[in-house]
Amino acid sequence: MKEVGGMPAGGDEQDRPLGRLAIPVYMPAAIYSIGLGAVTPIVAVAAHELGASLWGAAVIAGLPTVGTLIADIPAGAVVARLGERLAMVIAAVLTLAAAIAVVLTESLVVLAIASLLQGVSSAAFELARHALLTHLVQPSHRGRALGTLAGMSRLGITVGPFLTVALIAEFGALSAYWVQVASCVAVIAFLAVVSEPVSSGDKPIAAHGDPRGVIRSNAVLFLRLGTGMGALMLLRMSRQIIIPLWGIEIGIDPSHIVLAVGLSGLLELVLFYTGGQIADHFGRMWVAVPVVTALSLGHIALVAAHDLASFYVVTMVLGLANAFGGGIMMILGSDLAPTRRTSEFLGAWRLCADAGAALAPLIISVGTAVGTLAVAPVGVGILGFCGSMVLYRYLPVYLGDRQL
């Protein structure tokens, strides 16, 4: 049977309509993301309430990213050995235990450990969803399937904070973790009750689980396209940090900053499926390169925004660009992954992307320190252009006919 994009062509599993994946595949992702959305915005506040300085609170808030970087490659090995479902259950149990420990101990040290574990667990859970859809969905439908997965995660992260408002007002920042507790319990119960589509990754395979061979055999690919994906994630993470900072810099009222960011996020929720349609119908190149280029242009254009109207316009442009790129990192990873070592490959692939995201706060801090705040978005934008050129040059090499 001919292999296409890391999967054999044809087969009942791959021909499964996307609608049939909604409950067993997308629902757990949305529920788990609600818990992440509930606690992510409040970690720094909770740390400060427990006695951390502002600098210390910022460090603790960044620990989930550190945990994700640490866990990306090991998570690929775990998913390969245990299967997607069991890996997700373990990830949800770890997240549940960490959240309960936070609210019961009210300890700054426990909060820091829990934040690190959250990143580790999220890496395993998200990689398991990614690997499962790679096995189940044929390449011609991957854009829409993985774009929808990205959209469900964004939906959960958007809904999560709204569920914590009353709790935080009444009981303080740490109470947000009860929402995460509820989401983890719901995910574990869901996975125990609802039958999930079967993929080859559900069976432990003794020959799998060691990612070193996959990394060595794909080192040049990771260096090239991994750099491009790192640039994309750098731009995405930078956007979340730099927009509020630039709004403060030019004197925009905080309420307008929040509204602009909220409207930008709404665009992402509405348009997440569109990017997947473009990728499936016109090719991966028509999403990856334009999105990275547009995000780069948007960062550079931000320094020209000096009033409310232009601030809104640039923020919306950045949101629109990011919306059309929903799931593109996962789509390319699925296309490039080898058939029998999918999870290990995806772990290394996601590490490349997550490393780019982790660099964003550092680049913004250094850029601001050596110059003014305007240096940061321009510098990030230039790096983004470099990433778009890398993708333009090498995507055709590795995707062949699938990039057009």
Image (cartoon, rainbow, N blue to C red):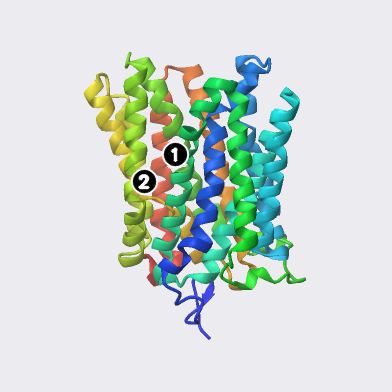
* Residue at 72% over, 24% down: 106
Query: Which of the 4 image quarters holds residue 98?
Result: top right
Badge 1 is on which residue? 158
Answer whether labels 1 and 2 touch (C-beta < 8 Å). yes
Residue found farthest to the left: 309
Q: How many numbered marks are there?
A: 2
* Residue at 52% over, 65% down: 133
Query: Which of the 4 image quarters holds residue 75?
Result: bottom right
Percent of width and height locating residue 392:
38, 55
**Left or right placement of residue 107 versus residue 173 in this view:** right
Badge 2 is on which residue? 269
Q: Amino acid at mark 1?
A: Thr
Percent of width and height locating residue 136:
52, 71
Tell me, yes or no, if residue 58 can be seen here: no
* Residue at 32% over, 34% down: 263
Q: Amino acid at mark 2?
A: Leu
Foreground residue among 325 and 37: 37
Secondary structure beneath dot 1 equals helix
Q: Is residue 71 above or below residue 163?
A: below
| Separation of residues labelled 1 and 2 (CA atoms) | 9 Å
| Circle nearer the N terminus (1, 2) | 1
* Residue at 38% over, 50% down: 325
Badge 2 crowding class, 10 Å Cα cut-off, few under 14, some 14 to 19, many 20 or more, is: many
Secondary structure beneath dot 2 equals helix
Identify the image quadrant of the C terminus: bottom left
